[in-house]
Amino acid sequence: MESFYRTHNYLLEHTYSSVRRILMDEIDWSDRLIGIKGSRGVGKTSFLLDYARERFGKGNRECLYINLNHFYFTERTITDFAGEFCRMGGKVLLIDQVFKYPDWSRELRYCYDNYPELKIVFSGSSVMRLKEENPDLSGKVVSYNLRGFSFREYLNLTVGTSFPVCTLDELFADHARIAGDICRQVKPADFFRDYLHHGYYPFYLEKRNFSENLLKTMNMMLEVDVLYIKQIEQSYLPKLRKLLYLLAISAPSAPNVSQLSKDIETSRATVMNYIKYLTDARLTNMLYNEGETFPKKPARVYMHNTNLMFPIRPSEVNAQAVRETFFYNMLHKDHKLNIGVRHAHFMIDGTHQFRIEESLRGKNNPNLYYAIDQMQPGGENLIPLWLFGFLY
């Protein structure tokens, strides 16, 4: 136990998040069993340590971070460890890499039922279905999703500003003033291209080649977050990798499932399941017609975020595809997106029709909203594209 406390204190002293994540204030920390899901590379470990530092501080033995990657847990059970932790006065156990431990959900439920003074916060892959696939936790666990940096978070970090979050309703009502206030302090266009290329994943701050690091992360998403968690045989990895490549070079587009099934030599049903797994892993996004959902074929498949588009075909990334992908990714957290109608790219929350443009060309359709790339402050139904990066 003492070695885990030493590791905990060392990590609190040496591991810092560059940005305080908004999710920290969205979580109801009074719940006793909390799951933090997110794709590989978005900063789940740092988030757990930030919580420990913010709420308890170094040296406080009521809170302890453990990583189930540790070989210690090949022999020791979570329940035994949690029991000892409680007897020593522990109150909050932060568990990282929970999926690496067999039967983890049953043991967490045991801890929930038998240690009523203990709070457990654990991290897991975005692929995990905490309630659907783990009936032990049904009605007990509350799960949240940690995303990569928004453009707002990236800008605050890069420039040293402290711009707050805006809601979509606030943008509709007052976007010209909001954008104007921001532009008086900083020129967002000077930083927007860099964000689209490498600003989503916090590890861009590390002194390593970002594209190579992202490619490694993408492969780990496939090998661990999809194959391992979904219990798919390793021999199918080449098919998944090829499918991701084919989707990436054509995105955004309506997937030709019949052709994809021929290309990767598997059934149409398997192709659809694989696309769903890629979406769960936060590698792709599926956009549907209103009223439709999986297992129906999506109207379009996008990459999950713009950073993922560049390592695969760095010299052939379509600028319009990047713009649409950014818009989808920024709104996806709190809003429902469907394929647009009446010349719109997207319909938001079943009501608002959006068209994404580099610049306004031709007649302004008053029945649409426009997200315009080459624009600083906008006006009326014309909103700067970068401003949607302030929604979280």
Image (cartoon, grey):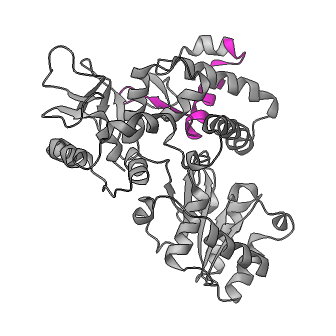
Give the quarter of the image for residue 280. top right
Query: Residue shown at 38%/56% (left/top)?
Result: 160
Q: Is residue 1 visible?
A: no
Q: Compared to 113, does 105 lie above or below?
A: above
Q: Compared to 28, does 236 lie above or below?
A: above
Relative to 47, is 324 on the left or the right? left
Relative image position of residue 324 (x, y in whole percent): 38, 27
Q: Compared to 208, does 4 lie above or below?
A: below
- Give yes or no for residue 280 being in the magenta stretch: yes
- Give yes or no for residue 99 being in the magenta stretch: no
Relative to 307, is 354 on the left or the right? left
**Is residue 209 or residue 71 the one in the foreground?**
209
Q: Is residue 263 visible?
A: yes
Q: Which residues are magenta?
A: 263-292
Relative image position of residue 151 (x, y in whole percent): 39, 44
Relative image position of residue 9 (x, y in whole percent): 66, 76
* Quadrant the N terminus occupies: bottom right
Relative image position of residue 129 (x, y in whole percent): 59, 49
Relative to 67, is 194 on the left or the right? left
